[in-house]
Image (cartoon, rainbow, N blue to C red):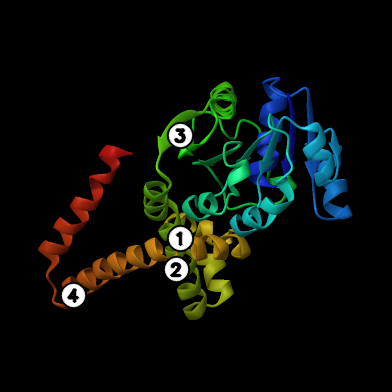
Amino acid sequence: MTVGIIGLGLMGGSLAKAVKKYNIANKVYGYVRNDEQKKEVLDLSLVDEVVDIDTLKKECDLIVLAVAVDTIIDLMPQLLDIKETTTIIDLGSTKEIIINNIPSNIRKNFVALHPMVGTEKNGPKAAIDNFYEGHIVVLCNIEDNDEFHSNRILNLFQDIGMKIVKMNAKEHDIHSCYMSHLPHVISYSLANTVMGHEDPKSIIALAAGGFRDMSRVAKSSPRMWTDIFKQNRENLLESIDLFEAHMKSVRDMVENENYDELEKWMVKANTLHEIL
């Protein structure tokens, strides 16, 4: 089939590599916003040709929206006249608001999903070979899709080596909040705390594995994550409240020198490794 990808950064660029590697697409088109990105995308051979959205709608069997979650919603009015056989997917980290904004006349074509994989990098140079293999992709509310479109997407992601999970969008957004969105909030908070207290030379000289690991995702795109936090606001606020309760608890244990309880608290946290 012919694939068109709007947004050729980490997610979209890596998917372009995957559909080429597994011979899923006979041709891959891309859409980018400016000439600088167009040159970069073509120099990296992520797509065969960069075209406009009208050409994507005319030529493509599958259109991939690999852009910020608010931009996914903004693009929907431009896709109202797609062919009946054209499938649309989005790779957004939130699902409920996106699904609620899909126009009814293309709902059967639009498969809302979220590959549970990522790095802190962005832009076309962030595209990675073998990025999706072995990871999970969550398909949300596929009972609202025509079987032709849902089966096409199930086959595609199985062919590139992903494990399929089906889930309600509301449930997905709760789980995604705790597994991804809250950790990003914590990482940004840690980075700002350290930068507000330590001078750059000390950070460079003394930052060790723990800080580097926990602050890594604070390098992620602020624009992209602002949109995600906005779309998943209620779940994020609830998760922050729960995290703050744990921080208050550990503060009280340290303040009151209750180190036996503190050790038990950390032992309980260690059991996470039995799951992961």
Comes first in the chain, label 1 or label 4: 1
Q: Mark 1 or 4, which is nearer the eye?
A: 1
Residue at (12% x, 70% y) in the render: 258
Q: Amino acid at mark 3?
A: Glu
Q: Which residue is mark 2?
A: 190
Which numbered tag is attached to residue 143?
A: 3
Cα–Cα gap, marks 4 and 2: 20 Å
Kindly indicate the quadrant of the structure image that contains residue 61: top right
| In-front residue for pair 105/40 | 105
Kindly indicate the quadrant of the structure image that contains residue 47: top right
Q: Mark 3 or 2, which is nearer the eye?
A: 3
Comes first in the chain, label 3 or label 2: 3
Q: Residues within 10 Å of mark 4 (few under 14, many from 20)?
A: few
| Element carrying mark 4 | helix
| Element carrying mark 2 | helix
Cα–Cα gap, marks 3 and 1: 23 Å
Q: Which residue is mark 4?
A: 252
Q: Residues within 10 Å of mark 3 (few under 14, many from 20)?
A: few
Is mark 3 in CB contact (under 8 Å) with mark 2?
A: no
Residue 7 visible? The answer is no
